Image: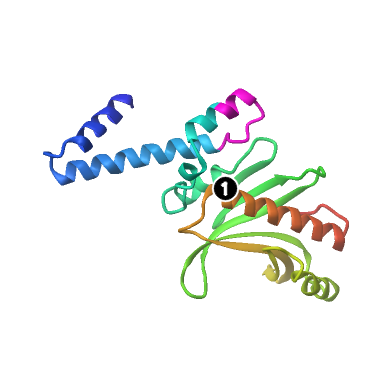
């Protein structure tokens, strides 16, 4: 791999070479860089201090980490970058991923992360989590509570003929970073668990 990288750097540096060779070299280096950053980002919050420090040095400053965008990393790489052992574990499901988030209160909340499109046609990353059945009392409470939430909002979804209350938020895919997706998943998990506790006092989702 090191030889391939050195070769690509040499080709990119050769201004006398063809534009095709230089373009391909840049594409190759970009893919290697993105894959490395995605792998490193998974351990940005590693419990081991030395590992965490080494990852921080490798990633560099925040401006460099912000290059990790959905348009650069694949959707799967973006999701994998926010995993953390014992805190957030992702598994593939139809249309995206389900992330099991372990909260500080010891409860677990499952968060769905999928791709979609807004009404205006912009590509989005949808983050949502089920809170409970969408009965009349829950819906009235959710509507009154929506105004108090910082970013998320409640919605009704239907599955197998049953209506459910979900909490969700969307990010613009082309501008989303791993840091933003991580924050969004954590926020949706926290407030969805809070809503579930208020509505049913159970930990079903």
Residue bearing mark 1: 179
Vertical position of residue 140 compared to residue 203: above or below? below
Residue 102, position as x, y percentages in the image: 73, 43
Residue 196, position as x, y percentages in the image: 81, 59
Residue 13: name its quadrant.
top left
Tell me which segment is drawn in magenta: 42-53
Residue located at (56% from left, 37% from top) = 42
Residue 44 magenta-drawn? yes
Residue located at (52% from left, 75% from top) = 119
Name the foreground residue: 8 vs 93: 8
190 relative to 24 in the view: left or right: right
120 relative to 200 in the view: left or right: left
Q: Which quarter of the rendered picture does the C terminus lie within?
A: bottom right
191 relative to 185 in the view: left or right: right
Name the foreground residue: 67 vs 72: 67
Name the foreground residue: 143 vs 90: 143
Q: Secondary structure at mark 1?
A: helix
Vertical position of residue 168 compared to residue 50: above or below? below
159 relative to 177 in the view: left or right: right
Residue 188: name its quadrant.
bottom right
């Amino acid at each position: 791999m090191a030889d391939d990288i050195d070769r690509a750097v040499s080709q990119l540096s050769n201004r006398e070479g063809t534009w095709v060779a230089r373009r391909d070299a840049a594409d190759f280096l970009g893919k290697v860089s993105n894959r490395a950053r995605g792998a490193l980002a998974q351990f940005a919050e590693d419990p081991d201090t030395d590992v965490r420090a080494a990852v921080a040095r490798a990633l560099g400053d925040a401006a460099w980490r912000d290059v990790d965008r959905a348009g650069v990393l694949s959707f799967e790489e973006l999701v994998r970058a926010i995993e953390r052992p014992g805190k957030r574990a992702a598994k593939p499901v139809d249309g995206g991923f389900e992330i099991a988030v372990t909260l500080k209160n010891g409860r677990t909340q499952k968060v769905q992360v999928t791709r979609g499109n807004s009404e205006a046609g912009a590509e989005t990353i949808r983050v949502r989590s089920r809170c409970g059945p969408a009965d009349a009392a829950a819906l009235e409470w959710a509507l009154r509570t929506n105004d108090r939430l910082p970013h998320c909002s409640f919605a009704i979804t239907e599955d197998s003929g049953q209506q459910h209350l979900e909490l969700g938020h969307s990010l613009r895919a082309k501008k989303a970073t791993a840091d933003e997706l991580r924050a969004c998943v954590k926020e949706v998990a926290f407030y969805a668990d809070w809503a579930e506790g208020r509505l049913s006092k159970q930990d079903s989702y």
